Amino acid sequence: MTKIEICLTGIESALAAQAGGADRIELCDNLAQGGTTPSLGMMSQVRQRLSIAVHVIIRPRGGDFCYSAAEFAVMRQDVLAAKEVGVAGVVLGILRPDGTIDQPRCQALIDLARPLSITFHRAFDMTPEPFAALDDLLELGVDRLLTSGQERTAVHGQSLIRQLHQRAGDRLAIMAGGGINAQNAPGLLAATGISELHAGSSCTELVPSRMVYQNPNLVMGNDPEVSEYAIPQITARRVRELVTAIRLGQS
C-alpha cells in the first residue's frame, strides 16, 4: 500500500493529518520558504500527541542548501534535539556550491541521527546530475528521497521519478512530492511505480479564527492581503480525500 506523508506546520495540522488517515508527517516551520526546522516545543508536543510517524526537517533557513559552518553547527544541534525528543526520522540535505551533494557533511548528520529514518529532501532537485546524485545517496545509505523529478511538480517530473525508482530498486524509496492532490495521485503512482507520496498544500484549507473581536485595521505579516483571522491548516477532510482517492485507485 502507498505510504502518504503530509508536510505541515503546527500541532493542529498534525492532529488533522493523523485523523485524516496519513501514514506519516513531515513537521516543519515556515512553509512559505519551503520549510525550516520547527521549535523544540513543537517537536516534543507533536511527538507526544501523534501515534503515526513524525519526521522533522533539519533546515536552518530558507533559500539554497549550501550552508556555512555556523549553519551546519545549528543543523547538528537540531538533529540531536529531534533525536532526543524521539521522532521517527529526520529530513535533510546539503549541497556544495557546484550543486553536487555534500557527502561528508550529510554523512556527519546521518551518523548523528541514526538509528532514525533518513529522508533526503528536494535539495536533490537542485543537483545538476540526478543519477550521479542518486548514486551519492545510495552510498550514504539514506532511506528515502523526496523529489519532484527536478520539475515544478511531480506530474511534470514523472519520467525522471520513474527512472530514479527503477535505478534505486529496493535500496532506497523514491517519494514524489510537489503538486500532489487527490486528482493526480493515482495516475502518478501508476506512471512511476513508486509507493510513497508527499502532499501538503492540497490538504490545506483556511480555518476561521476563534477570535470574536477582530481588528480590521491591523496586518501582522508582510502581505496585506493575508488575514490573521483565517488560518491555513491541514484538515482531516482534505487528507481523507487524498487517502480515499489513492486507495480507490489501488483497489
Image (spheres, rainbow, N blue to C red):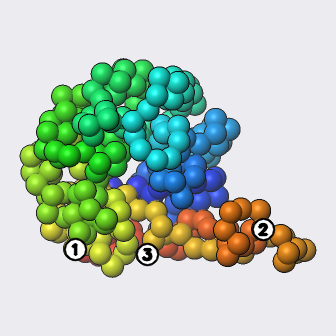
Q: How many marks?
A: 3
Find residue 216 and report its image quarter: bottom right
Query: What residue lies at 16% left-to-right and 45% top-to-bottom?
Result: 129
Left or right? Give the position of 3 relative to 230. left
> Mark 2: few, some, or many residues within 10 Å (few <14, many ≥20)?
few
Which residue is painted at 18% across and 57% down in the image?
161
Q: CA distance from mark 1 to mark 3?
A: 15 Å
Q: Secondary structure at mark 3?
A: helix
Earlier in the chain: of badge 3 and badge 2, it is 2
Determine which residue is flagged by label 1.
187
Q: Which residue does the numbered mark 2 point to in the structure image?
A: 219
Q: Quadrant of the C terminus?
A: bottom left
Judge depth for marks 1 and 3 and give the one in front.
1
Tag 2 or tag 1, which sits nearer the N-term? 1
Q: Quadrant of the N terminus?
A: bottom left
Residue 117 in view (yes/no): no
**Which label belongs to residue 140?**
none
Reading the image, the residue beneath label 3 is: 241
Residue at mark 1 to residue at mark 2: CA–CA distance:
41 Å
Residue type at numbered disc 2: Val
- Hey, which residue is sitting farthest right in the picture? 213
Between disc 1 and disc 2, the foreground one is 2
Residue 153 image offset from top left, x and y in percent:
31, 66
The answer to whether residue 41 is above or below residue 18 is above
Q: Is residue 208 above or below residue 69?
A: below
Residue 170: % across, % down: 15, 42
**Kind of residue indicated by mark 1:** Gly
Q: Where's residue 186, x and y in %? A: 26, 72
Q: Quadrant of residue 127?
A: top left
Q: Secondary structure at mark 2?
A: loop
**Nearer the observer, 242 or 126:** 126
Labels 1 and 3: the sequence-earlier one? 1
